[in-house]
Image: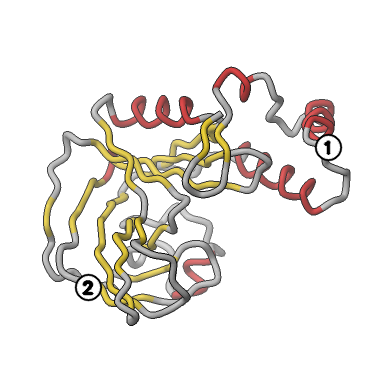
Amino acid sequence: MKTSNYGVTFLSREVANSIPFSSNKVEMENILNHFSIKQGSKECEFVKNTIGYCEGQDMKGEVKTCVTSLESMVDFATLKLGNNVEAVSTEVNKETKLQEYVIAKGVKKLGEDNKVVVCHKVNYPYAVFYCHKIDATNAYSVPMEGVDGSRVKAVAVCHTDTSQWNPKHFAFQFLKVQRGTVPICHFFTQEHVVWVSKDWPKFNLGQFKFAILESEDDDVLISK
């Protein structure tokens, strides 16, 4: 087993593949029994919701999968981006309380359009990530400074075409915009992983401006 920096444990591909991962009634019972999870419990709902989310249909312009091992994550990233890839995540130099941050100089574009794969950690008894590649998506490295002097090297993603998204998506409600009208951008917390092609040139964008909005979700929504 491999342990990430975020308190989740990666199973080896061999072990992960031996455990069912399906909403099929019989296999779901096997999953719950394997992890000693009771029907109707909060943990049971997490498992069912995650598998249902993973089995949902791709939206137009999206290719997705849920990976149950680190090896599977690497396989998906290299399949979509080629073998010369790099994994990046938000880095925090010290633990700190919730506070305001200012974007510093040195914002860099890491990848765009078909050169970005994003993997989100989801609720599950072991490490499972929802990985997807969405058309018209740009990735950025954004240095930030907190009011207490703490520094964050954040990863942000901007979706420049949201016309195919669910019109009831939280981002549209929070930002009070219609789908397909403006780019939707968001920062990632530390447990998310963004894969980019190392063959894509990295650009320093200088003083890049975002309007930062508070959110109760894992991400912070921003408008570019």
Other-residue count near label 2 (Cα within 10 Å), few / some / many at <14 / 14–19 / ≥20: some
Q: Which one is closest to the eye, mark 1 or mark 2?
A: 1
Question: The disc labelled 2 sits on which kind of residue?
Answer: Lys
Residue flagged by tag 1: what amino acid is it? Ser
**Mark 1 Cα within 10 Å, few/some/many (few <14, many 20+)?**
few
For mark 2, give the secondary structure.
Answer: loop
Q: Which residue is mark 1?
A: 36
Establish if 223 lies above or below 136: below
The residue pinned by badge 2 equals 209
Q: Is residue 101 left or right of residue 36?
A: left
Q: Report the residue at 38% width, 62% height from top.
A: 187
Is residue 177 or residue 69 the one in the foreground? Answer: 69
Name the image quarter holding residue 55.
Answer: top right
The quadrant of the rendering that contains the C terminus is bottom left
Q: Is residue 167 above or below residue 199?
A: below
Q: Describe residue 223's horizontal placement relative to residue 67 as left or right.
A: left
Residue 26 percent location from the top left of the image: 84, 26
Q: Quadrant of the N terminus?
A: top right
The x and y percentages for residue 94 are: 38, 64
Q: Is residue 212 left or right of residue 14?
A: left
Label 1 – label 2 distance at C-alpha = 48 Å
**Residue farthest right in this picture:** 39
Query: SS class of the residue under badge 1?
Result: loop
Write the residue at 56% across / 64% down.
Answer: 168
Tag 2 or tag 1, which sits nearer the N-term? 1
Marker count (numbered): 2
Q: Position of residue 82 (x, y in %)?
A: 27, 26
Residue 150, quarter of the rendered image: bottom left
In the rendered image, residue 38, in percent from the top left (x then y), is placed at: 87, 43
Say whether residue 8 is left or right of residue 37: left
Which numbered disc covers residue 17?
none
